[in-house]
Amino acid sequence: MAIPPNPEWKRLTKAELKAEIDEANAEFERGESITLEELEKEAEQW
């Protein structure tokens, strides 16, 4: 049985999805990313 999505979420248009992907790629190219190890260390502090 699947968990239903939040009814407040709206579907992205193709243009919105492309914009989000483009921004994610730009963030990566600017070095705005962390490694899995860094994420695990950060999660320990939650």
Image (cartoon, grey):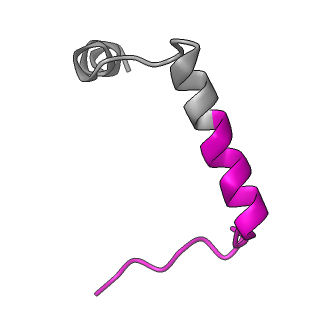
Give coordinates of residue 45: x percent, y percent: 34, 13
Apparent side of residue 15 relative to residue 43 in the rendered image (left or right) = right
34 or 42: which is nearer to us? Answer: 34
Q: Which residue occupies 67% across, 46% down?
A: 20
Quarter location, residue 13: bottom right
14 or 4: which is nearer to us? Answer: 14
14 or 35: which is nearer to us? Answer: 14
Residue 32 counted in the magenta span: no
Above or below 20: residue 30: above
Q: Which residues are magenta?
A: 1-23
Q: Which residue occupies 77% across, 61% down?
A: 15
Residue 12 counted in the magenta span: yes
Quarter location, residue 7: bottom right
Above or below 28: residue 16: below
Give coordinates of residue 44: x percent, y percent: 27, 17
Q: Which residue occupies 28% across, 87% down?
A: 1
Q: Which residue occupies 32% across, 20% down?
A: 39
Viewport quadrant of the C terminus: top left
